[in-house]
Image (cartoon, helix red, strand yellow):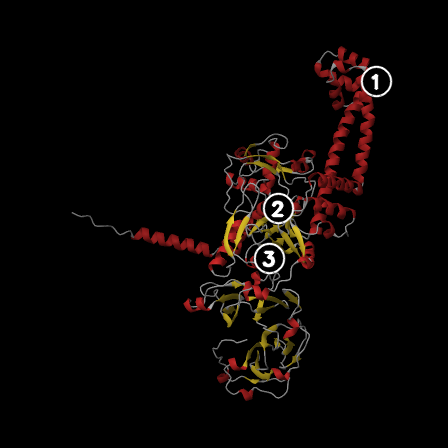
């Protein structure tokens, strides 16, 4: 007989109640408490203990690795297997052998990431300039500390820095390394934390030491005279812009443009690229050239290959017959990573707090920290000499009457009473008496006595000199300057990255070099830009936009067309459509803020195409004023990419219109009124920052909230809202005139 299956009704009700109870408990927990308790400790740990370098120029992972190698005796000794170093480092760094070895690779001489590498490596450690050249496993490679580490660890045993317990309290590790030179500026560093990042470019060691010494002597000196620009381990050439470089030195933010170095070999009709920007790789360059070649935009090249060997980097380009190498390289520089930018963000931990500092501020902070290190070293040396002097003073008393000391020791019955009896007999303390009691019998001779007596006077003199240094900050800083000069002479090398000034750049007619073909531009309300070719547009479906975003306008133009991008910070950015890659309807497109390098907190407002710069720009402000500015005031003869003071900053901007001829515009106020006026009623101005003239009179607290071309509105009875003279209040907007027509904008 089959048993009837029992329904688990009670258990089901218990499960439901438990789930409902858990749900109620989760709902009662505020999200702010969750973030504070669970997320903030993690965020702070990443910022303070992982991603951001400190004033010594090291992240914690770098510091733990180098200190472990120092304790292993790898500063003076021979190399050992990298696997051994990685294993020993795990006593201080519990993040796993792969992470430790990655750190070790980056600091090695073989990887060529740093201008002044800290690890003398043997074996395959990969290359910074190659994405696909993988480094060998740690069991195959060997390493030791490079000689420059002597300037890092020389003072570490003199109590110059604080030590703390490691993660399991079994040993001690330094909180900082007492670098004798501003390593924070010499070593390139990149880190991504939570809510912030750091990107520090390297500078030439000799130049940094000379600049720091000059600043110590004269804080008002021109640092760029001693260290004119960054220096990168991969070489290349910096396209020097004095204003941008000064801004980086002042604020710690900005970008440096770097291009590759190349030579033309006439015998084989080929180009050899032997240095590339620090921010790219060989594979990225070849991939981009291959992409352009497939798209038919690069027909001058017959072959391109990587010929990097033990002699160094080399990319070879075979040219077709009759190709001008100079023009081809100019084209490649514009369209491939052969010319790239390094974005500077000098974010450094100062006393546990992340701060973005300029070069002068970094040198000032490092000098203050190094001054404290030198003071602690001198104080340590003074204490050592004082302790020795104290012992020798006790010895001197006994050596003056050695027979009495021998008699006291001989007549003492117990070994434990020797020290107390010497203390009583000569009036010395226990430390001095212990020292005397340990002297060998063979040292009780005339020569030994005379040497120890003379040493007392020498020690007293040395201690007085050290005390004098401690009292004078000027003398302490003189020591720092002397050490910097020594390091510059001993380890300094010539710059790897060349500097090309504006007047040295060849004049190139970019309009002839840039391929020109029809495109359709789509711009969204939030500032996403898409450039789509007619072929791609015919095959594409619906345009994709970010959630909450929508199309602002679309317009047919060409690839070589120049455009003006207006922002809410009263600035305009100049660019060309060719600066953007061809896109598709299925992608969001390029975010103008990031692509054009907007300032922090700056947002997109509008975009227009000036053409031959004939016509005028209409600016409509919230306070009812309208400015009509000649478009040719935005034309520049130089290659300036950003114009400040692009429009008036007295009132928020509501709309921008680029017009080739006068048209009728409609202003809408928050009090429900509309006003139609003709731009012919406005006199054009030749000053970009003009306030304009009052067009719409507003009641208190009322503002203009939008504007539109009359032809794009749904106004039926236009005469109701027109006025013969301005300013005017307009008329109340009727319901039948409120609807807008769905038509595309034409500029």
Q: Earlier in the sequence, mark 3 or mark 2?
A: 2
Q: Secondary structure at mark 1?
A: loop
- Disc 1 crowd rating (10 Å Cα; few below 14, some 14-19, many 20+) is few
Question: How far is the residue under mark 1 from the one under mark 2?
Answer: 64 Å
- Which of the pair 436/344 is nearer the observer? 344
Q: What's the mark number on residue 400?
A: 1
Residue that label 2 marks? 233
Residue 724 in view (yes/no): yes
Residue toward you, 467 or 245: 245
Which residue, given by chain and number where applicable, does mark 3 sit on?
326
Q: Is residue 75 above or below residue 681?
A: above
Kindly identify the residue that appears in the image at 77 percent across and 50 percent down: 219
Q: Mark 3 to mark 2: distance in Å?
A: 25 Å
Give the class, few, some or many, for how many residues have Cα within 10 Å of label 3's Cα (few <14, many ≥20): few
* Image coordinates for residue 10, horizontal then vertical, percent: 31, 52
Res. 413 image quadrant: top right
């Amino acid at each position: 007989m089959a048993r009837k299956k029992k329904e688990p009704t009670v258990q089901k009700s218990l499960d439901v109640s438990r789930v409902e109870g858990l749900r109620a408990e989760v709902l009662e927990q505020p999200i702010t408490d969750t973030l504070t308790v669970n997320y903030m400790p993690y965020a702070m740990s990443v910022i303070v203990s992982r991603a951001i370098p400190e004033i010594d120029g090291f992240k914690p992972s770098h510091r733990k690795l180098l200190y472990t190698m120092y304790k292993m005796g790898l500063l003076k000794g021979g190399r050992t297997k990298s696997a051994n170093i990685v294993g020993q480092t795990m006593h201080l760094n519990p993040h796993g052998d792969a992470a430790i070895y990655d750190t070790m690779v980056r600091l090695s001489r073989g990887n060529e990431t740093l201008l002044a590498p800290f690890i003398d490596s043997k074996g395959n450690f990969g290359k910074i300039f190659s994405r696909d050249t993988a480094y060998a496993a740690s069991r195959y490679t060997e390493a030791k500390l490079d000689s420059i580490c002597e300037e890092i660890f020389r003072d570490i045993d003199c109590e110059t820095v604080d030590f703390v317990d490691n993660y399991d309290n079994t040993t001690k590790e330094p909180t900082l390394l007492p670098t004798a030179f501003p390593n924070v500026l010499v070593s390139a560093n990149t880190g991504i934390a939570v809510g912030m990042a750091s990107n520090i470019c390297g500078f030439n060691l000799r130049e940094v030491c000379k600049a720091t010494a000059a600043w110590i002597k004269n804080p008002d000196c021109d640092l760029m005279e001693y260290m004119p620009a960054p220096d990168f381990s991969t070489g290349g050439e910096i396209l020097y812009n004095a204003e941008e470089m000064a801004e980086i030195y002042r604020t710690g933010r900005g970008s440096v443009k770097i291009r590759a170095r190349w030579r033309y070999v006439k015998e084989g009709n080929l180009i050899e690229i032997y240095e590339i920007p620090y921010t790219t790789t060989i594979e990225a360059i070849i991939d981009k050239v291959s992409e352009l070649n497939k798209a038919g935009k690069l027909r001058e090249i017959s072959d391109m290959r990587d010929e990097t060997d033990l002699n160094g980097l080399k990319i070879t380009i075979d040219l077709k017959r009759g190709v001008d190498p100079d023009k081809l390289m100019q084209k490649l520089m514009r369209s491939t990573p052969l010319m790239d930018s390094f974005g500077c963000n000098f974010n450094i931990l100062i006393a546990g707090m992340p701060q973005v500092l300029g070069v002068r501020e970094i040198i000032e902070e490092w000098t203050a920290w190094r001054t404290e290190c030198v003071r602690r070293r001198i104080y340590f040396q003074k204490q050592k000499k004082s302790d020795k002097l104290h012992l020798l003073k006790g010895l001197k008393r006994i050596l003056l009457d050695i027979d009495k000391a021998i008699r006291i020791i001989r007549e003492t019955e117990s070994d434990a009473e020797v020290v107390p009896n010497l203390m009583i007999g000569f009036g010395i303390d226990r430390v001095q008496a212990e020292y005397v009691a340990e002297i060998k019998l063979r040292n009780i001779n005339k020569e030994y006595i005379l040497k120890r007596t003379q040493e007392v006077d020498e020690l007293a003199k040395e201690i007085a000199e050290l005390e004098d240094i401690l009292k004078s900050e000027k003398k302490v800083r003189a020591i720092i300057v002397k050490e910097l000069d020594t390091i510059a002479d001993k380890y300094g090398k010539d710059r790897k990255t060349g500097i090309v000034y504006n007047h040295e750049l060849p004049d190139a007619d970019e309009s002839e070099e840039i391929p020109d073909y029809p495109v359709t531009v789509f711009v969204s309300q939030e500032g996403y830009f898409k450039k789509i070719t007619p072929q791609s547009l015919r095959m594409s479906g619906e345009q994709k936009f970010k959630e909450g975003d929508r199309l602002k306008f679309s317009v047919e133009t060409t690839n070589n067309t120049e455009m003006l991008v207006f922002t809410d910070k009263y600035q305009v950015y100049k660019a060309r459509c060719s600066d953007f890659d061809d896109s598709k309807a299925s992608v969001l497109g390029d975010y103008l803020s990031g692509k054009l390098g907007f300032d922090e907190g700056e947002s997109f407002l509008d975009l227009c195409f000036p053409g031959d710069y004939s016509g005028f720009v209409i600016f409509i402000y919230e306070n009812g004023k309208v400015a009509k500015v000649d478009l040719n005031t935005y034309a520049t003869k130089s290659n300036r990419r950003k114009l400040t003071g692009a429009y008036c900053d007295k009132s928020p901007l509501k709309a921008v219109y680029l017009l080739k001829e006068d048209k009728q515009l409609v202003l809408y106020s928050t009090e429900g009124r509309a006003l139609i006026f003709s731009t012919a009623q406005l006199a054009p101005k030749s000053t970009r920052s003009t306030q304009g003239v009052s067009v719409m009179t507003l009641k208190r607290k009322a503002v203009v909230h939008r504007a539109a071309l009359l032809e794009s509105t749904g106004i039926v009875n236009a005469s109701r809202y027109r006025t013969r003279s301005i300013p005017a209040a307009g008329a109340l907007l009727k319901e039948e005139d409120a609807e807008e027509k769905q038509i595309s904008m034409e500029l």
